[in-house]
Image (tube, grey):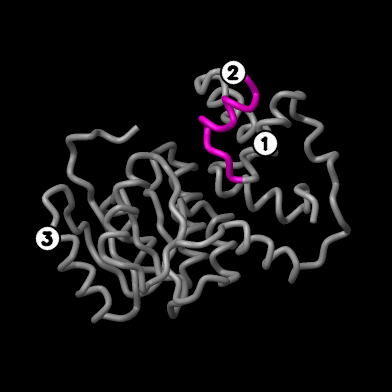
Amino acid sequence: MADAGARIAVALVDDQHLFRAGIRMLIESQEDMDVAGEAGNGEQAVALATLRCPDVMLMDLRMPILDGVAATRRIVEHAIAAGIDKPKIIALTTFNRDQAVVQAVQAGASGYLLKSAEPEFLLAAIRTVHSGYSVIAPGSIHSLFEHAARNAPSPGPDLSVLDVLSVRERDVFLLAAKGLSNGEMAEGLFVSEATIKTHLRSVLDKLELRTRLQLVAFAHERRLLGD
Protein backbone atom coordinates (compact mmCIF):
# COMPACT_ATOMS: atom_id res chain seq x y z
CA MET A 1 0.00 0.00 0.00
CA ALA A 2 1.30 3.45 -0.90
CA ASP A 3 2.50 5.88 1.77
CA ALA A 4 -0.40 8.31 2.20
CA GLY A 5 2.00 11.17 3.08
CA ALA A 6 4.41 10.73 0.17
CA ARG A 7 4.33 12.84 -2.96
CA ILE A 8 3.49 10.86 -6.09
CA ALA A 9 6.25 10.77 -8.70
CA VAL A 10 4.56 10.76 -12.12
CA ALA A 11 6.36 10.08 -15.42
CA LEU A 12 4.85 11.31 -18.69
CA VAL A 13 5.26 9.22 -21.84
CA ASP A 14 3.85 10.56 -25.11
CA ASP A 15 5.32 11.44 -28.49
CA GLN A 16 3.35 14.71 -28.64
CA HIS A 17 5.32 17.45 -26.87
CA LEU A 18 2.32 19.76 -26.48
CA PHE A 19 0.27 17.00 -24.84
CA ARG A 20 3.07 16.29 -22.38
CA ALA A 21 3.45 19.99 -21.64
CA GLY A 22 -0.23 20.28 -20.76
CA ILE A 23 -0.14 17.25 -18.48
CA ARG A 24 3.09 18.52 -16.88
CA MET A 25 1.41 21.81 -15.96
CA LEU A 26 -1.53 19.91 -14.48
CA ILE A 27 0.70 17.61 -12.40
CA GLU A 28 2.90 20.48 -11.19
CA SER A 29 -0.20 22.32 -9.95
CA GLN A 30 -0.91 19.53 -7.43
CA GLU A 31 0.52 19.63 -3.91
CA ASP A 32 0.86 15.84 -3.71
CA MET A 33 2.48 15.17 -7.10
CA ASP A 34 5.81 15.73 -8.85
CA VAL A 35 6.84 15.14 -12.47
CA ALA A 36 9.50 12.42 -12.43
CA GLY A 37 10.49 12.87 -16.05
CA GLU A 38 9.25 12.70 -19.63
CA ALA A 39 9.74 10.37 -22.60
CA GLY A 40 8.75 10.66 -26.24
CA ASN A 41 8.87 6.98 -27.21
CA GLY A 42 8.79 3.52 -25.65
CA GLU A 43 12.55 3.01 -25.48
CA GLN A 44 12.95 6.28 -23.60
CA ALA A 45 10.10 5.19 -21.31
CA VAL A 46 11.92 1.97 -20.38
CA ALA A 47 15.10 3.92 -19.64
CA LEU A 48 13.14 6.49 -17.63
CA ALA A 49 11.46 3.81 -15.53
CA THR A 50 14.84 2.26 -14.72
CA LEU A 51 16.56 5.57 -13.96
CA ARG A 52 13.86 7.44 -12.03
CA CYS A 53 11.67 4.62 -10.60
CA PRO A 54 8.45 6.69 -10.82
CA ASP A 55 5.39 5.72 -8.82
CA VAL A 56 3.00 6.19 -11.75
CA MET A 57 3.58 6.34 -15.51
CA LEU A 58 1.10 7.80 -17.99
CA MET A 59 1.85 5.70 -21.08
CA ASP A 60 0.67 6.58 -24.58
CA LEU A 61 0.03 3.41 -26.56
CA ARG A 62 0.79 4.71 -30.05
CA MET A 63 4.42 5.86 -30.26
CA PRO A 64 7.38 5.50 -32.63
CA ILE A 65 10.42 3.24 -32.10
CA LEU A 66 8.72 1.19 -29.36
CA ASP A 67 4.99 1.37 -28.67
CA GLY A 68 3.39 1.70 -25.24
CA VAL A 69 2.37 -1.96 -25.00
CA ALA A 70 5.91 -3.22 -25.59
CA ALA A 71 7.32 -0.58 -23.24
CA THR A 72 4.86 -1.59 -20.53
CA ARG A 73 5.80 -5.25 -20.92
CA ARG A 74 9.53 -4.50 -20.67
CA ILE A 75 9.11 -2.27 -17.62
CA VAL A 76 6.99 -4.83 -15.77
CA GLU A 77 9.26 -7.75 -16.68
CA HIS A 78 12.34 -5.83 -15.56
CA ALA A 79 10.76 -4.96 -12.21
CA ILE A 80 9.74 -8.58 -11.62
CA ALA A 81 13.19 -9.88 -12.54
CA ALA A 82 14.86 -7.29 -10.31
CA GLY A 83 12.48 -7.95 -7.41
CA ILE A 84 11.44 -4.29 -7.17
CA ASP A 85 8.10 -2.53 -7.20
CA LYS A 86 6.95 -1.77 -10.72
CA PRO A 87 5.53 1.63 -11.61
CA LYS A 88 1.75 1.75 -11.77
CA ILE A 89 1.15 2.27 -15.50
CA ILE A 90 -1.94 4.00 -16.87
CA ALA A 91 -2.34 3.39 -20.61
CA LEU A 92 -3.55 6.38 -22.62
CA THR A 93 -5.58 5.92 -25.79
CA THR A 94 -7.62 8.09 -28.13
CA PHE A 95 -10.62 5.78 -28.44
CA ASN A 96 -12.41 3.38 -26.11
CA ARG A 97 -12.30 0.13 -28.09
CA ASP A 98 -8.57 0.07 -28.71
CA GLN A 99 -7.21 -3.48 -28.97
CA ALA A 100 -3.90 -2.14 -27.70
CA VAL A 101 -5.59 -1.37 -24.37
CA VAL A 102 -6.30 -5.08 -23.86
CA GLN A 103 -2.69 -5.87 -24.71
CA ALA A 104 -1.45 -3.21 -22.27
CA VAL A 105 -3.57 -4.68 -19.47
CA GLN A 106 -2.20 -8.13 -20.27
CA ALA A 107 1.30 -6.66 -20.13
CA GLY A 108 0.68 -5.31 -16.63
CA ALA A 109 -0.89 -1.86 -16.94
CA SER A 110 -3.00 -0.83 -13.95
CA GLY A 111 -5.72 0.59 -16.17
CA TYR A 112 -6.42 2.92 -19.04
CA LEU A 113 -7.85 6.35 -19.76
CA LEU A 114 -8.91 8.24 -22.85
CA LYS A 115 -6.53 11.07 -23.70
CA SER A 116 -9.59 13.33 -23.73
CA ALA A 117 -10.32 12.61 -20.05
CA GLU A 118 -11.20 15.56 -17.84
CA PRO A 119 -8.23 16.84 -15.80
CA GLU A 120 -9.96 16.03 -12.52
CA PHE A 121 -10.55 12.44 -13.65
CA LEU A 122 -6.91 12.05 -14.70
CA LEU A 123 -5.66 13.33 -11.34
CA ALA A 124 -8.07 11.05 -9.48
CA ALA A 125 -6.87 8.10 -11.59
CA ILE A 126 -3.23 8.79 -10.70
CA ARG A 127 -4.08 8.82 -7.00
CA THR A 128 -6.19 5.69 -7.37
CA VAL A 129 -3.52 3.55 -9.02
CA HIS A 130 -0.90 4.89 -6.61
CA SER A 131 -3.09 3.52 -3.80
CA GLY A 132 -3.01 0.07 -5.38
CA TYR A 133 -6.26 0.00 -7.33
CA SER A 134 -7.09 -0.16 -11.04
CA VAL A 135 -8.73 2.54 -13.14
CA ILE A 136 -10.65 2.45 -16.40
CA ALA A 137 -12.07 5.02 -18.76
CA PRO A 138 -15.75 5.86 -18.21
CA GLY A 139 -17.91 3.17 -19.76
CA SER A 140 -17.96 -0.59 -19.47
CA ILE A 141 -14.67 -2.44 -19.15
CA HIS A 142 -16.56 -5.57 -20.14
CA SER A 143 -17.60 -3.97 -23.43
CA LEU A 144 -13.93 -3.46 -24.26
CA PHE A 145 -12.88 -7.04 -23.50
CA GLU A 146 -15.99 -8.55 -25.12
CA HIS A 147 -15.22 -6.58 -28.28
CA ALA A 148 -11.65 -7.88 -28.25
CA ALA A 149 -12.80 -11.46 -27.64
CA ARG A 150 -15.29 -11.35 -30.52
CA ASN A 151 -12.52 -10.28 -32.87
CA ALA A 152 -10.07 -12.96 -31.77
CA PRO A 153 -10.17 -16.64 -32.75
CA SER A 154 -11.16 -18.95 -29.91
CA PRO A 155 -12.22 -22.61 -29.72
CA GLY A 156 -14.84 -21.68 -27.13
CA PRO A 157 -14.96 -21.79 -23.33
CA ASP A 158 -12.53 -24.08 -21.55
CA LEU A 159 -13.40 -24.32 -17.88
CA SER A 160 -10.50 -26.70 -17.30
CA VAL A 161 -8.25 -23.63 -16.88
CA LEU A 162 -10.02 -23.13 -13.55
CA ASP A 163 -9.25 -26.63 -12.27
CA VAL A 164 -6.37 -25.25 -10.19
CA LEU A 165 -8.89 -23.25 -8.12
CA SER A 166 -10.91 -24.48 -5.16
CA VAL A 167 -14.70 -24.29 -5.37
CA ARG A 168 -14.78 -21.05 -3.36
CA GLU A 169 -11.90 -19.56 -5.34
CA ARG A 170 -13.79 -20.32 -8.53
CA ASP A 171 -16.80 -18.48 -7.12
CA VAL A 172 -14.61 -15.47 -6.34
CA PHE A 173 -12.99 -15.61 -9.80
CA LEU A 174 -16.34 -15.52 -11.61
CA LEU A 175 -17.73 -12.70 -9.45
CA ALA A 176 -14.57 -10.62 -9.78
CA ALA A 177 -14.56 -11.21 -13.54
CA LYS A 178 -18.08 -9.78 -13.66
CA GLY A 179 -16.85 -6.61 -11.99
CA LEU A 180 -18.19 -7.04 -8.47
CA SER A 181 -16.38 -5.21 -5.67
CA ASN A 182 -14.89 -6.98 -2.66
CA GLY A 183 -17.83 -5.79 -0.57
CA GLU A 184 -20.38 -7.10 -3.04
CA MET A 185 -18.62 -10.46 -3.26
CA ALA A 186 -18.40 -10.71 0.52
CA GLU A 187 -22.11 -10.01 0.85
CA GLY A 188 -23.06 -12.49 -1.85
CA LEU A 189 -20.85 -15.28 -0.49
CA PHE A 190 -21.59 -14.53 3.20
CA VAL A 191 -17.95 -14.06 4.17
CA SER A 192 -15.78 -11.13 5.27
CA GLU A 193 -14.00 -8.78 2.89
CA ALA A 194 -10.71 -10.00 4.38
CA THR A 195 -11.61 -13.54 3.30
CA ILE A 196 -12.45 -12.29 -0.19
CA LYS A 197 -9.06 -10.56 -0.44
CA THR A 198 -7.30 -13.78 0.62
CA HIS A 199 -9.20 -15.83 -1.96
CA LEU A 200 -8.62 -13.22 -4.68
CA ARG A 201 -4.87 -13.15 -4.06
CA SER A 202 -4.79 -16.94 -4.25
CA VAL A 203 -6.77 -16.86 -7.52
CA LEU A 204 -4.35 -14.36 -9.08
CA ASP A 205 -1.34 -16.37 -7.95
CA LYS A 206 -2.69 -19.70 -9.21
CA LEU A 207 -3.67 -18.27 -12.59
CA GLU A 208 -0.38 -16.34 -12.82
CA LEU A 209 -2.15 -13.01 -13.11
CA ARG A 210 -1.04 -9.74 -11.52
CA THR A 211 -4.13 -7.53 -11.45
CA ARG A 212 -7.92 -7.71 -11.37
CA LEU A 213 -7.98 -6.17 -14.84
CA GLN A 214 -5.90 -9.08 -16.10
CA LEU A 215 -8.39 -11.41 -14.42
CA VAL A 216 -11.26 -9.77 -16.35
CA ALA A 217 -9.31 -10.02 -19.59
CA PHE A 218 -8.49 -13.68 -18.85
CA ALA A 219 -12.17 -14.50 -18.34
CA HIS A 220 -13.32 -12.80 -21.54
CA GLU A 221 -10.52 -14.17 -23.70
CA ARG A 222 -11.47 -17.69 -22.69
CA ARG A 223 -15.22 -16.94 -22.83
CA LEU A 224 -15.70 -18.12 -19.25
CA LEU A 225 -18.60 -15.75 -18.55
CA GLY A 226 -20.96 -17.05 -21.23
CA ASP A 227 -22.60 -14.95 -23.91
- Cα distance between the residues tagged 1 and 3: 40 Å
Task: Read off the residue under disc 1.
Answer: 173
Callout 3 crowding tier (Cα within 10 Å): few <14, some 14–19, many ≥20: few
Residue drawn at 64 percent across, 32 percent down: 203
The disc, 1 or 3, on the residue closer to the chain's N-terminal end is: 3
Principal secondary structure, stretch drawn in magenta: helix
The disc, 2 or 1, on the residue closer to the chain's N-terminal end is: 1
What type is the residue that disc 2 sits on? Val
Badge number at residue 191: 2
Residue drawn at 75 percent across, 48 percent down: 225
Relative to residue 177, is residue 127 drawn left or right? left
Badge number at residue 196: none
Q: Nearer the viewer, residue 198 or 86?
A: 198
Q: Secondary structure at mark 3?
A: loop
Specify start and end residues of the magenta stretch as a single range. 179-190
Q: Position of residue 62 (x, y in %)?
A: 46, 76
Q: Position of residue 219 (x, y in %)?
A: 70, 48
Residue 149, above or below 218:
below
